[in-house]
Amino acid sequence: MTGRREPPARRGAAARKPAPRKSAPRQSAPRQPAARRPAATGPRRPLPPRRGTKLGNPGRRLQAALLCLSLVVALLIGRLLQVQGFEASSYAAVAQNERLRTVAVPATRGVIFDRDGDVLARSVEARTVTADPTLISDPRAYAHVLAPKLGVDEEWLAARLGDRPRRYVVLARNIDPDRWRDIAATLDPGTGKPVMGIFAEVTSKRVYPADTLAANILGFLNASGQAGGGIEREFDALLSGVDGEQTYERSSNGGKIATAGMRNREPVSGQDLQLTIDRDIQYAAQQAIAAKVRETRAQSGTVIVQDVKTGEILAMATAPTFNPNNPGKGSDDNRGNRALSQIYEPGSIMKALTMAALIEQGVVKPTDKFKVPGELRRAGHVLHDSDPHGTERWTLAGILAKSSNIGTVLAADKVSAQVLHDYFKAFGVAEPTGLQFPGESRGLLPSVEKWVGTTRYTIPFGQGYSMNTVQAASVYQAIGNGGVRIAPTLVRSWTDADGVTHTPQPPEVRPVVSAATAATVTKMLEQVTAPGGTAPHVKIDGYRIAGKTGTAQFADSECRCYRGYTASFAGFAPADDPRIVVSVTLQKPVRGHYGGMLGGPVFVDVMTFTLRTMGIRPTGAKPARLPLTW
């Protein structure tokens, strides 16, 4: 066939006549006729997309989304494994620590006994009342009902209960268990149910069964349980033991969960302590000195009772005193131990020491004769005796029995100041007693270089130096013990938690003068309590008494002058077999001031009671008699 060839139809598609395109008529500018393109000679290709337009790939977008989701899930799973796997214990510990509470479990303090095993101080179960302020809705309402039961100020208590965000505050200490049960049963004013947020910790309270008995020896514990003086403080490390510890988990309302997280470290109880004190003798001494202080309106008074053969102190009484069960009501002065802390110029009771030194040196004998004038001029000053007199003819024994200052100076002129000084130190004057008691004052003895002016002459009769009452008693213990000084002791033993009993190091034993000298001075001291001496009223039926009166001017630190007197009496019995020393001191009495008249009666009462309590019988020997005049 000849003629014009038709273009081939599209593959796979039926040849059809294209439908006419419908379009709305519109006004437009006449189009210029375009140049006719040449007819295609091959297959038609699709036109490329317009520039600036990109077609998205749904598959790729889905893959990206899944990848991101997988990463997030992986991170969550990793964090979960970290928290619940690798770090689970640490996070659990943090959470638990927020609920755990650790409290100290106080050790039971050791018991203090007297020499016969009677209790002087012990600890009993008590409670420390605490609160969690975050659990208390109305602090003022709680304070109103709890303050009377706790014994505290209501306003103070309201402030403590409202002290948020704290979760632990102490409200009261040393509460008896019965009292705590009453507190725990208190009802909330708002709900009518038991109060919430109030707790108690088991602790202990120090109790002194005999109240003021031996209070100045024992000391006390303050409100915080800290030792405040005396034996309690000196032996605190031994008595207190080692505290334990308890850790427990708290419930949501602040209570204790007994089985969750409970950890305990048991406390170690303190050691028991036994003193040399005899509670009956201590009581008699306290009663006697307290009565005399009231009678004479003295500033204070002390009594020391000491065993001559052992140096053990059987009583150490002070008046006025205090109650260690309530130490806050006592003054600082009354809570201390004046027998060791208060120093004073001893006066004539130390003439016995001077006589012992002179006799030991061999420069005088009890029967040596002296002319003693009414006045004696030394170092530009005039010395007197306590009572005016003319020239007297006294023996050395008479000088001691009459307590003559002037006669003592005349006798002391026979030795050097250095000799006297050395004997004073050997007898323990201005030396530590060895008791190591808190607040002890050792006194003052001037060095020989300072024995100038009147000091050289006043020291022999007990003025110009100072000492405490225990030191004074120790001088008489040495004389009564044949010239051998045994350092005083207060502690006999202590028993540890295993029941093993320990004893302290033996006290220092030091010969001071010979037994012959001590016996001679003892006979001279017997003349003091005989007719013609300064204390003939100091007597105990059936017993020989050796002692010395003392009346010294009181050195007042406030005015730095002498104001008032120190009245004293010291001695031992039986004189022919010395067993017990008693030393009595009254400071600044108002009604009277002579040592024989004030201290003597106390000496008799305490010595009589002690001799009977210790079962010491009279020897039956007749008193020694020495000539007092010539």
Image (tube, rainbow, N blue to C red):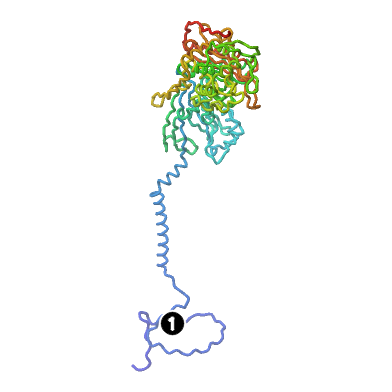
Observer able to see residue 245: yes
Which of the 4 quarters of the picture holds residue 59?
Answer: bottom left
| Residue pictured at 35% horizontal, 94% vertical | 2
**Residue 248 location (% of width, % of height):** 44, 36
- Residue 151 lies, with reference to residue 539, above or below; the image says below
**Residue 543 location (% of width, % of height):** 51, 8
The N terminus: image quadrant? bottom left
Name the foreground residue: 165 vs 494.
494
- Label 1 neighbourhood size at 10 Å, few (<14), some (14-19), many (20+)? few
Observer able to see residue 114: no
The C terminus: image quadrant? top right
Name the foreground residue: 471 vs 191.
471
Position of residue 353 in the picture relative to residue 497 (left or right): right
- Residue 227 lies, with reference to residue 529, above or below; the image says below
In this view, the residue farthest toward the left is 1
In this view, the residue farthest toward the bottom is 2
Q: Identify residue for label 1.
A: 18
**Residue 505 location (% of width, % of height):** 42, 25
Name the foreground residue: 140 vs 333.
333
| Residue pictured at 40% horizontal, 47% vertical | 88
- Residue 300 lies, with reference to residue 48, above or below; the image says above
User: Which amino acid type is marked by label 1?
Assistant: Pro
Position of residue 349 in the picture relative to residue 89 (left or right): right
Name the foreground residue: 314 vs 63.
314
Q: Total number of numbered labels?
A: 1
Tag 1 secondary structure: loop
Position of residue 267 in the picture relative to residue 404 (left or right): left
Position of residue 65 in the picture relative to residue 149 (left or right): left
**Residue 54 location (% of width, % of height):** 45, 73
